[in-house]
Image: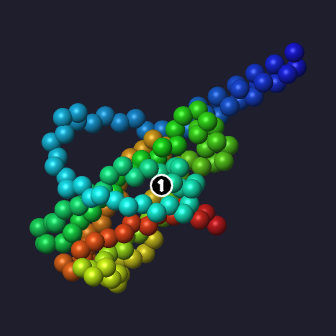
Amino acid sequence: MKMISLAGICLAAGIALCGCQNTVNTVENKNKEMQPQEVISKKVSTDSFLRDRLKIVRIDKKVNEAGLMKVQVTAVNVRTGFFHELWSSLSGGKPYKLLYKFTWLDKDGMAVPTPSANWLPMSVIPGDDVYFQAVAPNANCKDFKLSLREYDKD
């Protein structure tokens, strides 16, 4: 009897903790009118914790009016659901904080030094779509890399 009561208390506490998590609901146009130029990507993941939290959905690019490449990487925080919410509530992992930076490459694959090559902060709510955007610093930039890492709170 005590075992059933203890299990019920733990279950109720887990549900109560999960009820505190904020997630994002979205509505969008079903009949897409946009015509993005999608980039085929190659992903290298060395941080399994980050890989399991943030899923890259698509990468788009275009050349803007000034002749500079503009890229947008769309990702979603996939940490939703009962067990993910329970873990986030217990670990204080909401919203999820990360750092990102773009590295621009020339036609030969060499990194182009830029003043904006610093790590930038981003917060992601569970279930939320995020957009990492950047514009190449000059017309010699022909490719890019996006680097992501967890935000070190210390």
The image quadrant of residue 28 is top left
Q: Is residue 4 above or below residue 138?
A: above
Q: Position of residue 113 (x, y in %)?
A: 34, 84
The image quadrant of residue 150 is bottom right
Helix, strand, or loop for circle 1? strand
Residue 119 vs residue 107, the one in the foreground: 107
Residue plotted at (16% across, 66% down): 63
Image quadrant containing the C terminus: bottom right
Q: Answer whether residue 114 is visible to the viewer in this image.
A: no
Image quadrant containing the N terminus: top right
Left or right of 2 on screen, residue 109: left
Q: Amino acid at mark 1?
A: Ser
In this figure, which residue is indicated by the disc labeled 1? 123
Q: Position of residue 112 (x, y in %)?
A: 32, 82
Q: Position of residue 44 (x, y in %)?
A: 46, 63
Left or right of 8 on screen, residue 77: left
Q: Position of residue 10 (x, y in %)?
A: 75, 28
| Residue situated furthest left in the rendering | 65
Residue plotted at (66% across, 47% down): 91
